[in-house]
Image: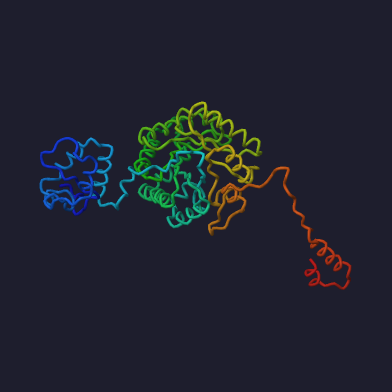
Amino acid sequence: MHPSFANCTPKVRWPALPPDAKGPHPKGLRALDGAAGQAEPAARRPRPCMSKTHYPGRSLDTLRKIFRLAWRPVALPLLALVLDGCTGLPPGSGSAGAMAKATPKDFATIRGANYRGATAANTTDYWLHYSATETERDLGYAGRLNLNQLRVFVNYASWQADKPAFRRNVVNLAQACQRHGIGLMITIGDTQVFIAEDRSINVTQARELITDLVATLGREPALAFWDASNEPDYNAAGSPADQQQKRFEIARLIAATLHELDKKTPVTIGVANERAMETLADAVDVLSFHNYSPTRAAIADDIARAKTFATKVGKPVIDTETGCVARANPYDVTLEEHTKARVGWYIWELMITKRWGDVHGVFYPDGTVRDPSIPAAIFGLFRNRSDNVLLENVNRESWVNTDDAAAQAWLDNPAGGWKEGLAAT
């Protein structure tokens, strides 16, 4: 007997079948409930688990009969429940791979954020100084906004520095997301490191990282998406002329490896510009672009182009980065346009961080926010920007006139002291 079957109790009662029974049970599905709920003969009443020690001669024989039932669509799930009850896991928990992925059915419902800890200088620093306590706190903030997805970067440097610690930390993040009901998109950052000095692509390094990531996270139920490369179309000024071409090759290589190793989790490539999304569309399951356009019209046009192309190729589309107070791309404006177009989004970013905090982010570490208009926009509450706005009348009750008169009286009084002046204003 397999040791996992010891000291356990099945979740359902087995049918009382005669030893020579063949074919479907004469009472059909009702037999799975002990002959329609009636008490079974003592000689055939199931004892704990299915070993020969506890239930002589019935375990394998009964299993074979269950498989011969005509009602296999029902019998097989029930059998899975029984076996699940003998694994030592909590009832209904199953294995991570058997649970539903956190990938939404309707991508327009995605309300996400990019995430790293507030004190992290970059991706490597975040993972080398990962804090489970900080993660739990920050995901609580995400819950306050009813966010349902997070996009988190990983890179080769943080994985290579301490692989066991990295594995523990990414699993901790995934399981924290699962506890909070948040899907997780893992994004491969800094992919330029796979370009060698001779401009060849280090395929081995890239594959090692991806293979380990899939082995570590592929069965975590919170895992909703893989992002094979962050912005391969964006490269710093002065980069080699072939930098974008090389990074596109790497993005395709990583996407292909993810498809090879993980048949369940959708793959995307989060590009900086919609045109690059079209170029890499054949490599992904889900199209994704980034939008930091400076006007409402430009935001709407970019979204419209992305939706048109997505319809043409028959793939879903999402925006995995948007929102920047320094680019005339304020959160309330960009989220309103995405909401009107029914395109799911991930803002940059959940926390006001050490690296991008002066232009991005919603929460400070203590839970206060940069600007209440950002949470309002996340909840779908937007300013009235139409022509029928009712302007405020700040002097409706004459308090402006009253204060103005008091201030003028103080100015006209040569003996007026500073205390009287403060009182007047």
**In this orientation, which residue lies closer to the viewer: 223 or 214?**
223
In screen coordinates, is 290 left or right of 37?
Answer: right
- On the rendered structure, is 416 left or right of 100? right
- Quick one: 279 or 65, which is closer to the camera? 65
Q: Relative to 189, is 142 above or below? A: below
Seen in the image, is 425 located left or right of residue 181? right
Please provide percent x and percent y for residue 19: 10, 41
Q: In x, y percent, where is residue 201?
A: 43, 31
Quadrant of residue 78 within the rendered picture: top left
Name the residue furthest top: 312
Left or right: residue 181 versus residue 422 is: left
Q: Choose between 401 and 62: the one closer to the eye.
A: 62
Tell me residue 85's x, y (percent). Answer: 25, 50
Q: Residue at x 43, y 44 (%)?
A: 157
Q: Quadrant of the C terminus?
A: bottom right
Q: Is residue 281 above or below residue 104?
A: above
Residue that appears at 55% across and 38% down? 342
Q: Quadrant of residue 370?
A: bottom right
Query: Which residue is pictured at 57% across the width and 58% down the height?
Result: 368
Residue at horizontal 58 percent and vertical 48 percent from the top:
360
What colour scheme does the image use?
Answer: rainbow
Residue 110 percent across, percent down from the top left = 50, 42
The total of numbered circles placed on residues is 0
